[in-house]
Image: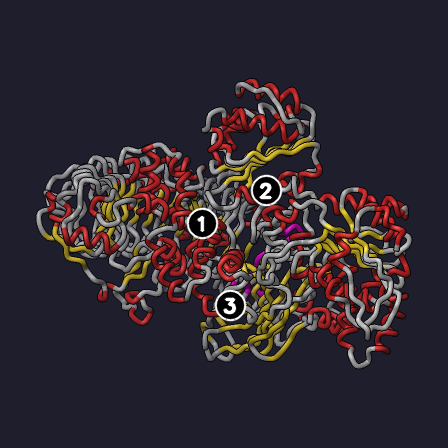
Amino acid sequence: MGQHEDKGPTNAAGRGLKRKLEPEFEDRKEDVKVVALEAREHRQANILHSVMELPGEVHSNPAITSTSFSMASQTLPSPRRSVCNYDVFLSFRGEDTRKNFTDHLYSALWRVGIQPFRDEEELRSGEDISTELHNAIHGSKFSIVVFSKGYAYSKWCLNELVEIIHCAETRGQTLLPIFYHVVPSDIRNQTGTFADAFARHEELYQNDMERVKRWRAVLKKAASRKGWDIEQVENGYESRVIDQIVKEVLSKLKPAEYLDVAIHPVGVNSRVEEMKALLNLETSDVRIVGIYGMGGIGKTTIAKAVYNQICDTFEGSSCLFNIKERSEQFNGLVGLQKQLLRDILKMKKFKIDSVDRGIRLIEERIQGRRVLVVFDDVDDWEQIYAFVGQCKWFGPGSRVIITTRNEHLLTQAQVNGKYEVREYEVRKLDTFESLQLLSWHAFGGAHPKEDYLDLSYSAVNYAGGLPLALEVLGCFLSGRSVIKWKSELEILQKTPHNKIQKILKRSFDSLDHNRKIIFLDIACFFVGSDKEYVITILDGCGFSSISGINILVQRALLRIDYQHNKLGMHDLIRDMGREIVCEDLHKYPGKRSRLWFHKDVLSVLHKHTGSEAVEGLILNPFPELRDEERSMTKASVGKGHFLNSPELKVENMKPESLEANGFILHLPGLKVERLKTEAFANMQNLRLLQINAVHLTGSFEYLSKELRWLCWHFCPLEFLPKNFHLENLVVLEMQYNKLKQIWKGNRILNNLKILNLSYSRTLIKLPNFLQVPHLEVLLLDECRNLVELHESIKHLKGLVRLSLKDCKKVRNLPESISDLKSLEILNLSGCLQLDKLPEKLGNLTTLIKLFADRTAIMQLPSSFILLKNLKEISLFGHEGTSLESWLSCFSSWISSPNCLNPMNLVRASVFGFCSLGKLVLSNCKLSKAENAIDLGGLSSLQELDLSRNDFFSLPQGIGRLSKLQILRLKNCRSLHSISELPANLRILFANDCSSIDRLSLSSSSQLFGLSLNNCSKLLEIQGLNLEQILFIEMIGCYNLSSDFTTNLLQYPSTQSAAQRLFCVPGSEVPNWFSHQRSGSSISFHVPSEGEIRSLLICAVCTYLQIGNTPDLDVIIHNKTRGFQHGLVRIPVEHCAEISNNLFLFEAPVIRNKLKTIDWPEKEMEMVNGEEIEVSFNNWGWIGAEVSKCGVHLLLEKPNVIDNNGSMVQYLRYDTAKDEEMSDAADDND
C-alpha cells in the first residue's frame, strides 16, 4: 500500500474512489486500479461541452481534445453535461503486473504531470464491479488495458472491460490495449491461456452463458484495436514502450494548446482526412493549402480540427482568426503579427510599430523553424504577405492553412507571392449528415423523433447541407411542437433566419455596385438558367457579366454546373439575396427593385402599386416553385417522372400537352392571368420581364422602354403591337404563342441577340432579318405552319445557332443560308418535307454540329466535304427513305490515294472530316456499307451509331478509329460477326443483332461496357477481360457456353471501386452469396465490426411475356430508421422470349455510405447493427417476377496489431467454394 506514497498525492483522488466492501462479498486478491486524475482545473472547462457524448472515433483522434471533432456516429447517446474526472483508467490483473509493468507505467504517468490515483485495495468480492469503479471508468478519457496471461481468469477484469468497451463505443473514450507477453490473436480467438480461462468460466456460469458470450465479444473487440505488443515493440524494452505510451497519452491531453471546435461535430472527420492528404506531412517542402467555400460551410471548423490533429508534430504553431475583421481595426495587422511571433517563439513582448517592421521580424525570427500556421478568413492577398512574404521564411516541412470565401485570392497568392497553393473546396453535408446535425441540436440525439421525421427532412432540405444553417435551425426549433415546426418552416421559406442571413451577407457586402446588381438579378430570376443566356441578357443591361460571374463564383456566391453550363446557387445564398431586395420593404412590394413572389407580383399588378424602383418582374402560371424544384423537374422529365403539381398530373396528360423550360404543360388546365398594361405605367426602369400565360389589355405604350429581356410564353396576341417598346430588347422569348407574325411593318431591333419562337404553331411568317441585324440565336422548333425562311437571313452575319427542328412544312432552305459565316449549330431534324440542302452548304466553314434526322434529303451537296470543322453529324433515317439515301451521301466522294483500297474499287471516303467527334447513320439502309464506306479517316470520331442497318459485316476502317469510345449497332439483324474493333473502344451496344454468332476483341481491348441483349445466336466472345468490365447485358443469349457465364459470375474482383452490373441468363443465385432467399426482398444487419467496402445484390427475374419490359428498380430500405431510397435502376429494353435472367449489381461503399439514384443524388449511410432490406420493384408489371434474391457484403476489418507487431488490414473476402460459404454467412450474419 505504501510503496507508491512518495510518488505524489493520492488523498484527494482517493476520497472519490474509496470502495465499500459489501458483507456478502467473498474476499479475494484482485487488481489494483490506477486512475489518472486531471491535473489542471482548466481542462474541465474545455471538456464540459460534449466529451461524454461523442462516438468512439472522436477521442481516439488527436484532432479533438476540447470538444471533439469527427464524423458523428449513429450510436451517439442523448447528450448531457458531464465532466471527465480522470485522464486514464488502468485495467490490469494485479497478480500479473501490479509490482512491475503497471507500477512503472503509473510512475511514468505521474512524472509527466498527469496526477494518477491508485486504488490500494487488493481484495475483491462479489460478481460485479463497484459503483465507484463503474463511475471511474465512465469518468475517464482514456482506458489502458494491460492484457496479461492471467487477465481472462479475473471476472472483475472482464466486467471492467465490458464497461470500457461500452464507453469506447458510445462515449468516445479512447481504448489503448497493451499486450503484455501475450499474443493478440490468442485474445481475439480465446486460445492459449485464454481458452483455459474460458473453460473455467463456462463451467462456473452454466446458467449464465450470455455473460460468458459477452466477455468473449469484448475481448475480441479490445484486442482488435491498435496498441502495443511488448515483445515486438522497442525490442521488448519495457521502459521504452512505457515512454511511447506516455507520449501517446500526452499528445492527446494538452487542451491549453488545442482549439475548441464544435459541440456536435457531425460529418467532419472525412473532410479532415481529405485536408491531411493535401497537406502530406511526409514531404519536406513548405506547403500551403487554401480552404475555400461559402460562409457557414465549415472552413474554420475544418482548419481547427486539422490543427488539433497535427500541431504536436511541429516546432511551433499559431492560429490567427478573423483576419478580415481584425485587419480593419487600428494596427490590426500589427497585432496579428505580434500574436504569430508570440505563439511560435513563446515570447511575450515584441516591438513592432508597422506592418513592414513585422514582416522583417517574422522573416528574421522564424526562419528555419518547422511551423504550422492557420490564417482564418483572409480576403486580401496583402494580408497573406504580411505573415508569409516568401515560403523560404519557414523551415522545411512547414505547413500553412488559409481559409477564405474568395477562391481567386488563392490564385493571387500563387501569382503574386509565387507560392504553390493547393486548394480544398469544402463540400456540403449530405442528407444523412445533415439530419444527424439537425437532430443533435433539435432533439439532443442522432435521430429525429418519429413525429418530426418529415419536418426534419424539410428543415434539412431548406438548409441545403450548410452546417451553420442546420445548427441555427436545430437550436431555434428545439423544444417546439409539431405545429410550431410547420409554422416556423413556412416562415423561413419566405424570410431567412437573421443569424444565417448576417453571416452569408458578408460576402455580398464585399462586392462592388455592379456585381451586387448581377448577383441580385441571378438570385431573383436566373438560378438554373444557361450561363451564356444570362451573360447575353446582363451584358445587354450594360454590365460586364463575364467578370462579374467569375467574381461571384470565386466568392462562393455562385456555382456553375459545367456539364450543363447552368448557373447554380445554394438556396440560402439565393434567399439571402432575395431578402436583401425585400429589406425594410416587406409591406411595400411595389417599391422593391425586383419582384418574383407570385402573390406580391399579382398584388402590385392588380393594385397598380409599381414604382420606378422596379427593375425586374416575373410572373409564372404555376404556384411558387423553388428553383431546385424547377431543376428537379427538368431532370425528372428525362427520367420518366413528372412534377407533383395539379396541372401536371400524369392522368391529365393530353396529346396537346407541350414541354417547355423542362416542364410538361397541360394547356387545357392552364390558368391565364388577365391584367391591364396600365399596371406597368410607373415601372419606367423595368428591364427584365417575364409574364408567362398573361393576357394584357390596354396600350402597350405603358411598358418600359428599358426592357432588355422579355419572356412571354402563351402570349395570346397575333402580333406584337407597334407601340410596344422593343428597341432595347436583347432577348425575346415567345414560346407557345398564338402569333401569326411577330410584328407588322418595319421595326428595327438593333440590340436583339436571341429570338425564340419555338412551338408557335400558328406562325406563318418571319420578319425581314434586316430588322434584327445582330441576331445570334434563332430558335423555331415545332413551328408547324412555317413553310420557309426569309432570304434576308443571309444578313445575319453573327448568327451562331439556327434550329428548325420539327418544322414539318419547311420544304427548302434559301441558298443564302450558306452566307452565315458564324453559324456553328444547324438543326433540321424532323423537317419531313425538306428534300435537299443548299448546294453551297460547304461555305459554312464554322459549322460544328449538323442534325438532319428524319428528313426527306436524298443527297448531300458536293460541297459537304468542305465542312472541315464538323464535330457532330446526325443523319438518322426514317421509314420510306430509299436504299441509296445515305449511302449516296458519301459515294459522291472518291477515295483518296491514301485510302486503303487494294482492289482499286471506287469506295467512299470521309477523310475530310478530321474534326468529327460524333456520327449518327442510324436506319439509313446501309446494306453494302462494308464495301461502300471507309470510315478510317474520321480520326477524331468518339461516338458512332450505325444501328438499324442491313450490312453483313462492319464498314471498313472502324478498327483504325483510335479515339472511338462508343459504338452502337442495335438492330443490325443481318450482321454475322463483330471483329477488328479499336482497342480504345469503351462501350459497345449490339442489342437485337439476331444473326451475330461471334464477337472478337483484341488482347489490348479497354472495353468496360457491353450490351448484347437478344443476340440469340451468339456462341462465343473472344478476348473479353472480365476484370475491367463494369456492365454487361446478355438477356436472351442462350447459346453461350456455360463456362462463360460461370466465369462471369465468379466471386467479384477485389480491385473494383466502381459500380458493376451483370445481366445474364440464369435461374440461381451464385452459391457464394452469404444471404439468399426466395422472393423479391431480403434483409441483413450491418456488421458491428469493420467497414463495408462493397454491397453485392442479386436477383433472379423470370419474364413471363414477350415484349417491352419495365426497368427493375432496386430499393434499399433502412428498417431501423424507417426511410428508403432507390439504389439502382436495372434497364431491361426488350424481352424477345420467355426467359430466366440473373441480375448482379455491385455497389461500392465509402465510409459505410451508398450512392442512391434519388434526385438530387443522395448518400445513404448504413450504421452498425441497423437492419437493411433490399427489394426489387417492377412496378406491378405482371409479365415479370423476381423469384430469388441475394445479398453479399465485402468487409474491411479495422486495423490491429498482429503478433508480429506490424500493421495489417484484414480485408475479408469469402471464396466461392461451397465448403466455405457457410463461414461467410456466419461472418456476415
Q: Judge by depth and name the residue closer to the eye, 818 or 458.
A: 458
Decide if residue 102 is on the left or right side of residue 923.
Answer: right
Using the numbered discs, state the Cα–Cα distance from disc 1 to disc 3 in whole angstroms. 41 Å
> Which of the two discs, 2 and 1, sits closer to the camera?
2
| Residue 1007 magenta-highlighted | yes
| Residue 718 magenta-highlighted | no
Q: Tell me the residue that label 3 is attached to.
A: 1124
Task: Give the SS element for disc 2.
Answer: helix
> Which of the two discs, 1 and 3, sits closer to the camera?
3
Q: What residue span does the magenta drawing correspond to?
A: 991-1012
Corner quadrant of residue 791: top left
Q: How would you rate the neighbour count of disc 1 (Cα within 10 Å): few for under 14, some for 14-19, many for 20 or more?
A: many
Decide if residue 588 is on the left or right side of residue 251.
Answer: left
Q: Judge by depth and name the residue closer to the eye, 5 or 138.
A: 5
Corner quadrant of residue 753: top left
Above or below residue 1149? Residue 109 is: above
Q: How would you rate the neighbour count of disc 3 (Cα within 10 Å): few for under 14, some for 14-19, many for 20 or more?
A: some
* Disc number placed over residue 919 in the picture, else none: 1
Point 57% across, 33% down: residue: 421
Above or below residue 262? Residue 1177 is: below
**What x and y, as percent, mark residue 748?**
16, 37
Q: Name the amino acid type tagged 3.
A: Gln
Q: How is the image coloured?
A: secondary structure
Q: Quadrant of the N terminus?
A: bottom right
